[in-house]
Image (cartoon, rainbow, N blue to C red):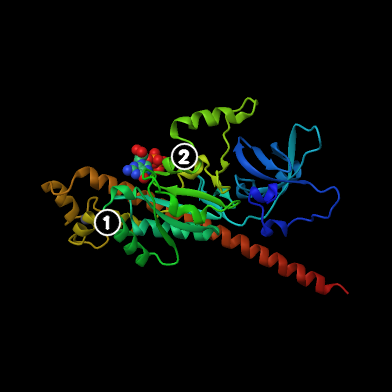
Amino acid sequence: MSALQRLGWSEFFQQQVAFDCADRLQLVRVVAEQRGLYAVSGEFNGWAEIGGRFRHEATSEARYPAVGDWLEVAAPPGAGRGVVHRRLDRRSVLSRSAAGRAAVEQVVAANVDTVFLVSAFPHDVNANRLERYLTMVWDGGGVPVVLLSKADLCEDAAEQATLLRGRLRFVDVVLVSAKAPDGLHALTPYLRPGHTIALLGSSGAGKSTMINRLLGRDALSTQAVRAADGRGRHTTTSRQLLEMPGGALLIDTPGMRELQPWGDESAVDRTFDDIAQLARHCRFTDCAHAAEPGCAVREAVTTGTLARERLVHYQRLVREAAFEAGKRDVHVALERKRRWKQVHQHQKELYRRREKP
Ligand code: GDP
Ligand code: ZN
């Protein structure tokens, strides 16, 4: 296996570069990003910055490199820093809409092959939420695998997994435990050398514990690894793309941990079943449980059957979900417009050529 293959290089990227060119640029993969500078590994190891031409041509934030991207950089011998000339096309992305900014796509990681969706027994396993995560991963071009973690805490873990398999077809559902001796054995088939993985899931699901075990370090030594990572340079950047003992690669960026699929209102309803039940008895079917007459939900708060905080929490979530849905619509609309613009430009170009003698 070549050094580039160990970093995840494959046929898909190979096809995008001209290898026979005598003075071709160096191929590198982004292993960390910090304030617009990229730590890269490959045919050049060190820091790289965006070249002027690249900046000029990058029309949106999502076009800039992200951790996991393959780049062509120019780094003459002796140069302290490489200059990024080109980003190769991505095989997959994990992205989100940038916080607080409608319809701006932010790429959290690129070229992730397999995404482990981690949910913990007993309370965190939720098929509806998993379905939203699955959609998000598939949309980005990655392959999801559902991990049911903390299997040691659940007596009927195997049955639960079987139930979920019936519900989520087209995806592997794997039982794991970061605490049991062979608890991560079932992951071996996914951890092939040069294969890039990432972990997503709610906080407390056991991701950090699992990552530490997969990387063969214990939680306490994590800090030490990070501190030693600067290789003499004064920087606090830790690598966000790491090689595991067996040769698989793990992407763990800060943004990854907070990555959530875009919300939809029906999903909020499902987590507030009690309120949804009560709402059936409201006089108006579209009751917002605010000031409407005949509201069964507020009635339940008055009589003490429903906690007031729960209603407040529900209303806040509904507002947020509506907001996210709105942003997503804008995003979709913009994307469609951009595509059509390209199609139209292409057509114009064709007509122009045809008119020429
Ligand atoms: P994260 O927020 O997803 O990174 O979750 P952590 O890795 O910090 O784990 C949250 C808690 O669950 C910690 O107290 C862990 O010790 C515990 N935990 C993680 N994995 C397991 C497991 O497989 N079994 C059990 N019993 N506890 C676990
Ligand atoms: Zn109501």
**Pointer 2 local density, CA inside 10 Å: few below 14, some 14–19, many at least 20:** some
Image quarter of residue 204? top left
Whether disc 2's CB lies below 8 Å from ligand 1 is answered yes
Q: Amino acid at mark 2?
A: Asn
Q: Name the residue tied to disc 2.
A: 212
Q: Name the residue tied to disc 1.
A: 156
Residue 170 against residue 227 in the figure, above or below: below
Q: Position of residue 1 (x, y in %)?
A: 68, 51
**SS for dot 1:** loop
N-term mark: 1 or 2? 1
Is residue 329 something that shows in the picture? no
Q: Amino acid at mark 1?
A: Asp
**Pointer 1 local density, CA inside 10 Å: few below 14, some 14–19, many at least 20:** few
User: Residues at badges 1 and 2 in contact (C-beta under 8 Å)?
Assistant: no
Residue shown at 22% from the left, 51% from the top:
291
Relative side of 255 to 319, left or right? right
List the single residue furthest toward the left: 303
Residue 49 against residue 105 in the figure, above or below: above
Image quarter of residue 132? bottom left
Q: Quadrant of ligand 1?
A: top left
